[in-house]
Amino acid sequence: MLEKAGQPDARDAISPEDELKDPFVLEFLSLKDEYSENDLEEALIQHIESFLLELGNDFAFLGRQKRLRIGDQWFRVDLLFFHRRLRCLVIVELKLGEFSYADAGQMHLYLNYAREHWMYADENPPVGLILCNRKDEAIAHYALEGLPNKVMAAEYQMVLPDEKILAAELERTRKALEQRKPTENDPNQNE
């Protein structure tokens, strides 16, 4: 039993999808209706403890506006984190508007650079999180699927949704889960 417990099990592995949620609720920032990307970043830094709690467990903040030079051009990564359980860098790019396929290309560039210049030998490849106001699921699917780097897009909200909207979403989710439950007569139940 002890030998078996010492062996890694694939079912114990976690993925970036398990650790990064969507959407993020950033109501603690108290930003007004109109703000810039810089205002958003500054507010996140001022409330870094609350943002780390919103991100989830095991995130460590490494820096902001981390500079990188590729060819003759300079770029800046908005926020840089390390996730202890995933054992990888997490690059966060902030976007005010809707997610765009161009955002995926930008993040892919950053991740390739981070893999080559910032990643240590014992770490897993870096993960990119594009934090945006809105995302079209179809655009995100086709822009992010199949990339050699793990890039995800998640929405942020400045306030929690209305109570009625939350209740309706919970009811919709409950019904969807009930429909997925196998029945005693279901031939696929043991698969």
Image: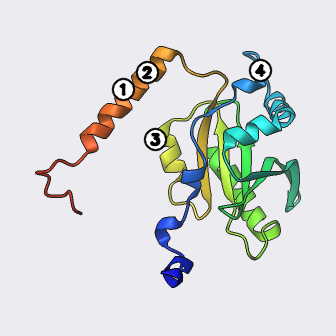
Instruction: Give the answer, above or below, for where 116 lies relative to 84.
Output: below
The residue beneath circle 3 is 138
Horizontal side of 28 relative to 43 (left or right) equals left
Residue drawn at 74 percent across, 75 percent down:
122
Spatial CA span between label 1 and label 3 = 24 Å
The answer to whether residue 99 of the structure is visible from this angle is no
What amino acid type should be assigned to the residue bearing mark 2? Ala
Of residues 8 and 40, the one nearer the viewer is 8
Disc 2 residue crowd, few under 14, some 14–19, many 20+, Cα 10 Å: few
As drawn, the label of residue 16 is none
What amino acid type should be assigned to the residue bearing mark 3? Ala
Of residues 89 and 148, the one nearer the viewer is 89
The residue beneath circle 4 is 31
Residue drawn at 77 percent across, 70 percent down:
116
The secondary element bearing badge 3 is classed as helix
- Res 68 → quadrant: bottom right
- Pick whichever of labels 1 and 3 is earlier in the sequence: 3
Disc 3 residue crowd, few under 14, some 14–19, many 20+, Cα 10 Å: few
The secondary element bearing badge 1 is classed as helix
The secondary element bearing badge 4 is classed as loop
Instruction: Give the answer, above or below, for where 82 lies relative to 37.
Output: below
Name, please, the residue furthest toward the bottom: 3
Circles 2 and 1: CB atoms closer than 8 Å: yes
The residue beneath circle 1 is 171
The image shows residue 25 at horizontal and vertical percentages of 64, 30
- Pick whichever of labels 4 and 2 is earlier in the sequence: 4
Of residues 111 and 88, the one nearer the viewer is 88
- Pick whichever of labels 3 and 4 is earlier in the sequence: 4
